Image (spheres, coloured by chain):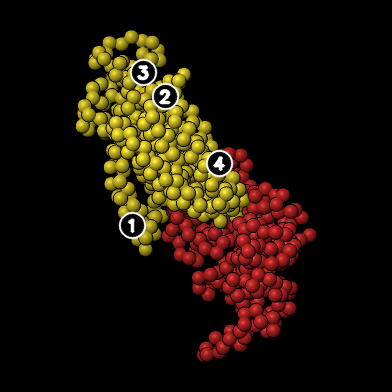
Chain colours: A red, B yellow
Amino acid sequence: MSLLELKNISVSYGDITVLKEVSLELESGDWLMVIGPNGAGKSTLISAIGGAAPYTGDILIGDQERTSMRSRDIARRIGTLNQSHSVGYSFSVRELVSLGRYPYRKGLIGGKDEDNERMVEEAINDVGLGAMADRSLLTLSGGELQRAFIAQLFAQDPNVLMLDEPTNNLDLVFQKEIFDLLREWVSRKDRAILSVVHDLGLARTYGSKALLLDKGTVAAYGCMDEVFSDAVINSAYGLDIRRWMSSLYSRWTD
Amino acid sequence: MQPHKAEKNRIKNRLPQWEYLAFIAAVLLTFVLCVSVGTVRLPWSDVIHYFTDLLFGTDYEYAVSSAPQIMTVRVPRVICVALSGMSLALCGCAMQGLLKNPLAEGSTLGVSSGAALGAIIAIAFDIHVPFLSLAGPTVMAMLFAFGSIMLILFLAYRLDYSLSTNTIVLLGVIYSLFVSSIIMFITTFSSEKIRSITYWTMGSLQGSSYTEALILFTVLAVCASVILSKSEELNAFAIGEDNARSIGIDVRKTRLTILISVSALIGTCVSIGGSIGFVRLVVPHMTRMIVGPNHRRLLPATLFSGAVFLMLMDLIARVILKPRELPIGAVTSLIGAVLFVFIFAGTRRTHR
């Protein structure tokens, strides 16, 4: 059974079509890398699945049609990490992470539930913020803030994580930490990741499948070797990507 | 690294659960203070005995012989002030969370301007409502408040199905400006009523009755329960709408529910007390500094602090130039503005 399936998803704003007939399928263990130049429709794809953009076509979550599901039930299956976080008030890390348990809480009060609390503490420890659980979000660095939001996703415990540029603006060490963390997460049962990643080196290393978008249409979709060929990638980006990327590292000394 | 430490301590030092007892005690103390002080100063013993007389039917020799008469005027007024303070502060708090904007408040929606228009039409054209013990302006303000929110939500739906924050705020602000100009027209053409119109716009709870207190209490009880039941959702909105959607909140439905509750409450308050500014903006800020931004504790705390704040402001309005009474709206804005600058400077320092 697939965890997430898209059939001919299109998104238009007025006369402008931003995404045209995208189909894809995620099964347990998949990490799908969505790549493509700016404006290809990568973030729009995530918005459509997450319910933030109007779409046509069918989205199946588990084996249910998305439109027939309650938002809480969708949240138990899919969690989204958005591209940017601007936090306004000084919530603590723990308060943020415990919001991840929202789709599981029952009734009006239902806040104190041992299961929920345990999941929250585990998630905070998993991302390495155990010592900062009571810190205000406003005092965290960019990397710590991103990890706090990832902890919220872990607490939410969905089957599919959708990540829009999870390591944008983070230094290389953080990038590696976060991608390793996600690889560990997806290795467990009934889990899959769909992520938008700009760094093609990272995408090639961590992904198991790839979707190359170009001007809103699918330029290539399939296993890594199929998508990551010079001919396919270069035509979408209009640049000899591999040559350029290797030239970036060729000047290094041992 | 200093602000980090300060911030950490601040969060750890949030008050424990007994804070509610402290808040209730503060409200009761302020209440007794407010009914005893005024143009005529009543001793506390008279105040307390007035209530024991009411409850147990005892007969007490008052130190000030006119105490019972004074109390029948003062008590409903102070109750109305307390309820208004609670309502206005709660609305501000909910709006600041919902719109993730510390400058948002109930009037951002345009409802209070709508209510004001209703009241001013009633004053200018001498509209009276038969069979009701309420004044014409009050009833008209309620009707107009309700009509305003319906109009704004209808337009918002037509323009932007997703009911985004920007659409609502923009519509609210434009609506307020539009209504203000109508108010100016009416005021220009009814020069003989200018005094009472101006007085009404400044806001006052003078002469409030038990009927008004009961109406306010009923609306507050309903709307506050709705808003308080959405604490967790407000937390998510305060962090970000995208985040709220991701964790499974029905963003549109929740926003609509909260907006309608806030509008009903603001509309009722404005129709009874006129436009009283700044409570909805300042009180939630002050409360957030004490109990933190988590709405599970912030919303109930705001109810109490709103009551205390407005009762004290009303007290100042009554006694500072006695026997002349100042409009409470002028006092809250005057003191509120100064307080706000201090609070803003304070939060800037800890957040940077």
Q: Residue furthest top?
A: B59
Residue of label 3: B51
Q: Distance between the Cα atoms at labels 1 and 2?
A: 52 Å
* Chain containing the residue with disc 3: B
Q: As rendered, which of B224 and A8 lies closer to the eye?
A: A8
Label disc, if present, on residue B257 of the rendered structure = 4
Quadrant housing residue B185: top left
Answer whether residue A210 is visible to the viewer in this image: no
- Is there CB contact under 8 Å for labels 1 and 4? no
The C terminus of chain B, quarter of image: bottom left
Q: Is residue B140 above or below residue B1?
A: above
Of helix, strand and loop, which one carries label 4? helix
Residue B349: mark in rendering: 1
Q: Relative to residue A66, is residue B300 depicted above or below?
A: above
The x, y position of residue A25, in whole percent, is 74, 65
Rounded to the nearest whole Å, what is the CA distance between mark 3 and mark 4?
Answer: 38 Å
- What crowding class fits label 1: few (fewer than 14 Cα within 10 Å), some (14-19), or many (20 or more)? few
Q: Specify whether B266 is left or right of A16.
A: left
Q: Where is residue B197 drawn, in percent x and y?
A: 33, 33
Q: Label for residue B128?
A: 2
Mark 1 or mark 2: name the one nearer the start of the chain: 2
Residue B157 position in % (x across, y down): 57, 48
Quick check: marks 2 and 3 in contact, CB under 8 Å?
no
Disc 2 is attached to a residue of which chain? B
Of residues A163 and A99, the one drawn nearer to the viewer in this rendering: A163
Distance (Cα) linking label 2 and label 4? 32 Å
Distance from Cα at disc 1 to Cα at disc 4: 35 Å
Labels 2 and 3: the sequence-earlier one: 3
Mark 2 or mark 4, earlier in chain: 2
Identified at 58% across, 86% down, the residue is A244
Q: CA distance from mark 3 to mark 1?
A: 46 Å
Q: Secondary structure at mark 1?
A: helix
